[in-house]
Image (tube, grey):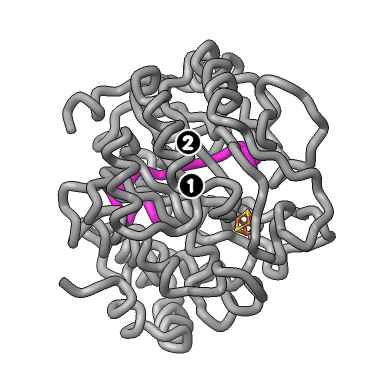
Amino acid sequence: MTSFSQELRQWPVDRVRHFIRSMNRPELVARALTGGNLTTGDFAALLSPAAATHLETMARRAALLTRRRFGRIMQMYAPLYVSNHCVNSCLYCGFNCRNRVERTKLTVAEAEAEAAVLARQGFRHLLLVSGEDRRAVPVDYFVRLVRKLQAKFASVAIELYPLEEAEYRALVEAGVDSLTLYQETYQEEEYEKFHPAGPKRDFSQRLGSAERAARAGITFLGVGALLGLADWRIDSFYTGLHARWLTRHYWRQQASVSFPRLRQATGGFAPPQPVSDAELVQIICAQRLFLPDAGLVLSTREPSGLRDRLVALGITRISAGSKTTPGGYSRDHGGEPQFAVQDQRSPAEVRQALRRQGFDPVDKDWDAAYH
Ligand code: SF4
């Protein structure tokens, strides 16, 4: 079987830039909005500047397509940060090993207590998040934790450092069914700039993670790029290609796309290529139209008013009431968060807002039993 890295080599950054430029024509955007299955050319047109004047049509079509494929269901999940120890120095992240922040690692019992808080709030889908430090939080730690959690949650997802296939398999056997791993940027030269030291410098190792996870039996594969780091049109194009490639090569799995938009982080990092609200709308709609069956995920990085508008465009999964410090749910130790949560509403308030818009927020689905 080929790997996505081979496909990526077919699409060097300059080719993608020129390709999007060549599709930057209103008639090509209009064509993309009337066809059925979108080609890569249609997708490039929807990501081009010419699509900015078609946002209303894009939004209507994206919403309609999502309702047809997913109904009014909105899957709820909560992140659980277990450790902010990290050996990497990603310039945009508050947990960067060069930042002087209080470092915390939850014991398995402490993490269980955090999960219990989330279970009481009604969550049945949990996302375990950790910085990269194999000594502080080895794979075995997650295996032990997931074994404890899997009976209480319908789905346990991980957002960890890249693992080997056998390690993913051990986590699947413990009860993990979902992976989230952003490439940050698919543009390798840019990637090197933002990851000056640590194991995360290995672009290829990160890129192959979703494939190793799929081979190990992880069912849900989440990809994404950090919006604001590099040219969002190019990174969104690659993200769509990646999700489509995973879907085509691992048909038993479901790919999903997240839209993490960068904000100011500890250490004074400002996003070099900020993404506006209108551009975020364009990205979400373009991904939905290109990937009709993909899950689209929105976190609490976005403020409440904007989230309420974005969910209608094609989002199928959202978090609520998130804390981005280890131990943040059961105690307020004032630690530095990985990113500032913008939507400060409680999970109950988010569910209410979704119901007001006609959505059916669900904490448990039957995927676990089905698979
Ligand atoms: S983004 Fe992840 S790997 Fe990078 S510094 Fe932050 S926690 Fe560490």
Labelled disc at residue 73: none
Neighbor class of circle 2 (other Cα within 10 Å; few <14, some 14-19, many 20+) is many
Labelled disc at residue 127: 2
**Which x, y percent locates residue 147?**
37, 29
Judge whether residue 145 is colored magenta. Answer: no
Please report whichever mark, 1 or 2, sits nearer to the chain's N-terminal start.
Answer: 2
Judge whether residue 301 is colored magenta. Answer: yes
Q: CA distance from mark 1 to mark 2?
A: 7 Å
The answer to whether the residue bearing label 2 lies less than 8 angstroms from the nearest atom of ligand 1 is no
Lateral position of residue 292 relative to residue 311, left or right: left
**Which x, y percent locates residue 266?**
80, 53
What residue type is disc 2 on?
A: Leu
Q: Which residue extends farthest top?
A: 120
Task: Residue at 33% x, 67% y: name it.
Answer: 241
Vertically, is 6 above or below 185? below
Please name the residue that numbered disc 1 is placed on: 159
Task: State the image quarter where residue 102 is shown.
Answer: top right
**Which x, y percent locates residue 185?**
53, 69
Vertically, is 357 above or below 66? above
Whether residue 234 is visible, yes or no, is yes
Q: Are marks 1 and 2 in contact (CB under 8 Å)?
A: yes
Q: Which residues are magenta?
A: 287-304
Vertically, is 135 above or below 225? above
Q: Quadrant of ligand 1?
A: bottom right
What residue type is disc 1 on?
A: Glu
Task: State the image quarter where residue 226 is shown.
Answer: bottom right
Q: Quadrant of the C terminus?
A: top left
